[in-house]
């Protein structure tokens, strides 16, 4: 889990603008991938990761529960996975395979239909944009899912007996939208809200006991820190009543954030936080 030193504007823009980063891997079998419980995945799950699988990045770098291993937390087909890393910039891999990180992609999630033969083509890597020998043309009436847009390119999924992913410019008059966006947001379950409130209330009680004790002992009126939380169906926002407390509470708040993150591990929600704020928000995803 990574501490994000950003502003509130950043958090809200991520939620409402449907922007995400993607890791695209040529041969996912070369990587070490764990499931949402941070355990090795089965061969059956591994086989669903076809060449050039797009993994939506939820956390670029975080420490796993063993407190040793680093990984990226990613999303694919509505499931959370962890891709293990050997250092900050590289993933543990059996081969020297291509993978690319694409930032600030606009999530789409709609379905398009190809209108003409030999009009819309796909290619496996952006560097092949002008290399027609690397292009495969799609057939008329073929349906594709637009996963995201990156700059002037679209990343497509071609469903079928064998799923194919690829980039395309999607030239005009060669396609049309046949089904609207399937992007989904999820309502935060009541049981997770209750567990979070219990954990935050316990932290606030600890602060009250600690600061109250020393206030009485030294006959001083110390202002007591506490977390104020606002809850909606789709988001939870926590704010420390005075940001100046953050420095002295750095260690205790780190454990608090780890506990909150564990509460939502494997769910449709993710935690982002600074020293004095945190957000639990739905993962922007496509289906």
Image (spheres, rainbow, N blue to C red):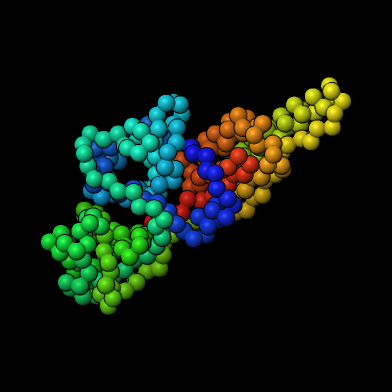
- Whether residue 133 is visible here, answered yes or no, is yes
Nearest to the observer: residue 5 or residue 190: 5
- Whether residue 188 is visible here, answered yes or no, is no
Answer with left or right where residue 209 lies relative to residue 102. Answer: right
- Furthest-right residue in this view: 219
- Furthest-left residue in this view: 133
Locate the C terminus and report the quarter of the image it occupies: bottom left
- 282 over 85 or under it: above or below: below
User: Residue 6: x and y, percent?
Assistant: 55, 48
At horizontal 85% and vertical 28% (from top left) the residue drawn is 220
At horizontal 42% and vertical 42% (from top left) the residue drawn is 60
User: Residue 74: x and y, percent?
Assistant: 39, 44
User: Residue 137: x and y, percent?
Assistant: 17, 66
Answer with left or right where residue 210 lies relative to residue 272. Answer: right
Nearest to the observer: residue 87 or residue 260: 87
Q: Quadrant of residue 117?
A: bottom left
User: Residue 66: x and y, percent?
Assistant: 44, 26
At horizontal 31% and vertical 59% (from top left) the residue drawn is 155
At horizontal 16% and vertical 62% (from top left) the residue drawn is 131
Answer with left or right where residue 195 lies relative to residue 168. Answer: right
Q: How many marks?
A: 0
Answer with left or right where residue 39 lies relative to residue 234. Answer: left
């Amino acid at each position: 889990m990574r501490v994000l030193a950003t502003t509130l504007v950043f958090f809200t823009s991520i939620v409402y603008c449907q922007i995400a980063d993607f890791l695209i891997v040529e041969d996912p079998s070369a990587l070490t991938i764990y499931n949402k419980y941070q355990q090795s995945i089965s061969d059956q799950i591994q086989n669903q990761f076809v060449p050039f699988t797009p993994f939506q990045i939820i956390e670029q770098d975080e420490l796993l529960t063993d407190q040793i291993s680093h990984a990226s937390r990613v999303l694919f087909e509505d499931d959370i996975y962890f891709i293990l890393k050997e250092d900050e910039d590289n993933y543990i891999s059996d081969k020297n395979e291509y993978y690319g990180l694409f930032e600030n992609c606009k999530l789409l999630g709609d379905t398009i239909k190809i209108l003409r033969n030999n009009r819309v083509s796909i290619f496996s890597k952006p560097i092949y944009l002008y290399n027609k020998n690397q292009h495969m043309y799609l057939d008329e009436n073929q349906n594709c899912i637009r996963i995201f847009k990156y700059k002037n390119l679209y990343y497509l999924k071609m469903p079928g007996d064998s799923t194919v992913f690829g980039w395309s410019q999607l030239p005009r008059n060669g396609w049309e939208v046949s089904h609207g966006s399937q992007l989904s947001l999820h309502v935060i379950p009541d049981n997770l809200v209750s567990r979070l409130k219990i954990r935050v209330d316990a932290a606030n009680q600890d602060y009250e006991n600690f600061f109250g004790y020393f206030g009485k002992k030294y006959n001083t009126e110390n202002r007591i820190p506490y977390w104020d939380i606002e809850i909606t169906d789709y988001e939870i926002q926590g704010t420390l009543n005075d940001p100046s407390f953050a420095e002295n509470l750095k260690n205790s708040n780190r454990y608090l954030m780890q506990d909150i993150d564990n509460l939502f591990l494997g769910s449709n929600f993710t935690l982002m936080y600074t020293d004095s704020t945190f957000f639990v928000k739905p993962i922007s995803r496509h289906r």
